Image (cartoon, grey):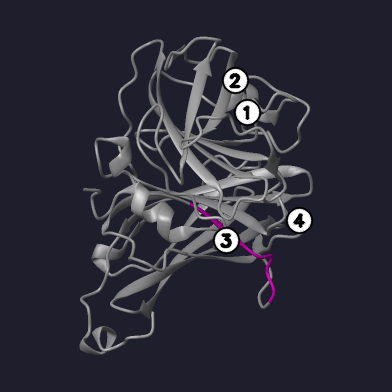
Amino acid sequence: MVPKNSMFNQAMACGLLFGCLSLGSAQAQMNHGTHGQLKIGGLNSNHMQAGEPTDWLLRFFDSHTHQQITDFDIMHGKLMHMIVVKDDLSELAHIHPKLSDTGDFSIRVNTQNEDPDNQDLPNTVLSAGRYFVFTEALPKDAEMMIMNHFELSAEGMDSQPKPLEIDLDMDQGEDFGAKYFKEDGSPGVEGDRYRVEFSVELFEWCNYYLPKFYFKILENREGDYLPAENLNEWLTMGGHAVLVGLDGEKLEDRTFYHLHSFSPIDEPALFTFPYDNHQEGLPDGEYKIWGQFKQAEQILSFSFGLRFKNPPSSVSIFRKTAC
């Protein structure tokens, strides 16, 4: 029996609604009738050296015919989106492997390549510890994207897990938080280049609530924080966001979503990321969310720690039948 909050159930619920990602178990997981294989350094291994340039190769197979899937369509500007997250949520990389003529995806992590959308690539696996690798691809003529995940161990100098810093605590009634970031998007202090305002809004849906996440990007111009300019579409959307849960020791128990926002329409530099699972609400717990945006030619990642809390269900919400 699949657990109620498992990634498998989330994946089945999401489909292609704004490209949500929610993924299954370890090295070769059935997911929408497919399973994946990840080779590290040419070996069937889930170990690598932290910080070292390392070749990754990925293959995907039809679980019914056991034939390799070799033909893919572009989705959000790429043939594959790969999200690499350290298990304590201290590191994230959003990268894009290249498809070969034989149907294999490959990428060399911890190095640079010619793709300007791979700005995270040099920082894929920087420190020792456990990492989760989430993949999203769309086989040609398929109705749904295939979503697989893998777990790997990076070896190196011992590093202690970093505690998640909570920037917005809904358990305390908060729905708004703000942080400052430096020129390169790294954490900063007041007076640095960016002030980013993050907020959460809840909407009733069926017998639960749907959250929306908002990022407003302000830029320091002569001492005043004003809406950022020169924000460009990135990978066919105004912005991308990755939401990962801290709760759950096993990878299959972790909540994971890849969300998307259109470019700002009503208010400059304000991006809206709807939670798109219309089968169940987001569970209470601790999460980290990264908003990723393109300004001029630079990809910026702004992260917030979130303690998410659903309000008590009202009587009216349970009377709704149209879901």
- Which three-letter amino acid code belongs to the residue tagged 4? Asn
Mark 4 crowd level (few <14, some 14–19, many ≥20, 10 Å Cα): some
The spot of residue 51 in percent (x, y) is: 53, 15
Q: Is residue 323 left or right of residue 102?
A: left
Nearer to me, 21 or 194? 21
As drawn, 77 above or below 195: above
Q: Is residue 4 left or right of residue 8?
A: left
Q: Residue at x 63, y 39 (%)?
A: 80
Q: Residue at x 69, y 37 (%)?
A: 71
Q: Is residue 247 left or right of residue 11?
A: left
Do the numbered discs 3 and 2 sit on residues whose CB atoms are within 8 Å?
A: no
Q: Is residue 268 visible?
A: yes
Q: Residue at x 60, y 34 (%)?
A: 69
Q: Which residue is mark 4?
A: 232
- Earlier residue among tags 1 and 3: 3
Instruction: Tell which tag, 4 or 3, sits nearer the viewer.
Output: 3
Q: Is residue 46 magenta?
A: no
As drawn, 67 above or below 214: above
The numbered disc on residue 110 is: 2
- Which three-letter amino acid code belongs to the residue tagged 2? Asn
- Which three-letter amino acid code belongs to the residue tagged 1? Leu
Residue 216, image quadrant: bottom right
- Earlier residue among tags 1 and 4: 1
Instruction: Tell which tag, 3 or 2, sits nearer the viewer.
Output: 3
The spot of residue 240 in percent (x, y) is: 59, 53
Do the numbered discs 4 and 3 sit on residues whose CB atoms are within 8 Å?
A: no
Give the structural element (helix, strand or loop) at label 1.
helix
Q: Which residue is mark 1?
A: 121
The numbered disc on residue 18 is: 3
Do the numbered discs 2 and 1 sit on residues whose CB atoms are within 8 Å?
A: yes
